[in-house]
Amino acid sequence: MSDGSGPTLVGSWEAEGTDLAAITAAVDGLRHQGEHLATRTSVVNLVVVADDERTLGRTAAAMRRLGARHPGRTVLVRPSPEPSGSLGASVELWEAVAAGHAIWWEELSLTVGGDAAAHLDSLLTPLVVRHLPVAVWFPGVLPRPGDPLAAMADAVLVDSRFAEPLGAASATPRQALVALTELARRHPVVDLSWKRTSPWRELLAALFEQPQLRGFQLGVAAARLAGQPGPRRLLAGWVADRLNLAEDIVATEDAVHASIELDAVSGGRRGRFVVRRVGDEPLVDATAEVDGEQLVSLRRQLPEHGLTWSLAQALSRLERDRIYEHALRRALGWRVPA
């Protein structure tokens, strides 16, 4: 953990109309500077591909807030529609403090035009730190099948709340789900929306683990899932898969925050299980009632920065998640509007 001072920019370089040799020279120069300032402890390469500055800025800020917890080389890439093969670049050296020790890492920003934008793997291979895992994050538009940049990654990061298939700016939630399912079939996929819903999923599981409530998970008669389109479909798929529910007892609806409500019966008793966010507070409550009497109440504090937290969780496990993949496939079978 950082000692609280936050990251500090200690050196930078930028150029327009540059080339790969100049960029690598700038990285080497700043790296030499960093070696005199602190200890480099990179653990991952994070490549972010987006076509707008706002998204790149948001993702860069999330990575910086991780501070010393997940230091690594971050490469922000914005493919440009310009037909010329111009290359703009900046390199920044950042420092943070962890357990009393200063560490440093680099952040590269590239604007790539012309044919090079279609061959980002060739451009980026020399810029990532060798022998460290490579995570490629597509925060909005998903990569096309066979995308060489996705192929070079140890894991592909997505966010199903914002995911859109390539060339489908007004895609339906189902089209996005189809694209995510196909992507997960080809590559290890880590979904930040899935990570952000983990408090809901963990609290629901914790309710069923209570001794006085065991058995109700076998008698769920109705399930209602709410939230944003991507996350609520994931939750619906997960609930249906884990509890082996028929499609006709699962309903979904739009909402600002995610929620799960289940009606169940066991031994002649009626139970109601609810996991929902408390208004706009950073809290998730889970309650279980049996025959109208509340038996269990659990609560989980949400992180201050949801994107940063979910990114940290994603970078901690760059591997396939079979439960997520099962939830995707189950959600894909839904015919009801969601």
Image (cartoon, grey):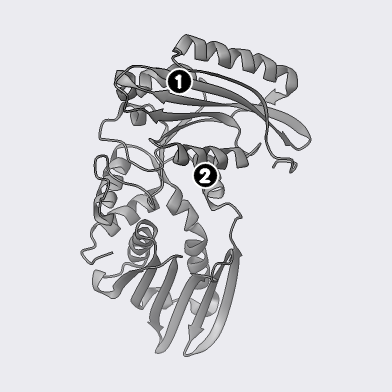
Q: Decide: marks 2, 1 in contact (CB < 8 A)?
A: no
Residue ID for mark 2: 311
Most extreme residue toward the right is 100
Residues 14 and 226: in front is 14
Res 231 label: none
- Give the quadrant of residue 167: top left
Q: Is residue 337 above or below residue 18?
A: below
The answer to which of 131 and 112 lies nearer the viewer is 112
The residue depicted at 24 percent of the width and 65 percent of the height is 337
Of all residues, the one furthest to the left in this rendering is: 335
Which of marks 1 and 2 precedes in the sequence? 1
Q: What's the amino acid at mark 1?
A: Gly
Q: Is residue 281 left or right of residue 109?
A: right
Which numbered dot is residue 88?
1
Q: Nearer the viewer, residue 107 or 57?
A: 57
Residue at figure coordinates x 42%, y 77% from the top left: 216
Quadrant where the image shows the N terminus: top right
Residue 61, horizontal then vertical, whole percent = 56, 40
Vertically, is 81 above or below 162?
above
Q: Position of residue 41 (x, y in %)?
A: 64, 27
Q: Nearer the viewer, mark 2 or mark 1?
A: 1
Element type where label 1 sits in the image: strand
Which quarter of the figure has residue 112?
A: top left
Element type at mark 2: helix
Label 2 Cα crowd, 10 Å radius (few <14 / some 14-19 / many 20+):
many
CA gap between label 2 and label 1 equals 27 Å
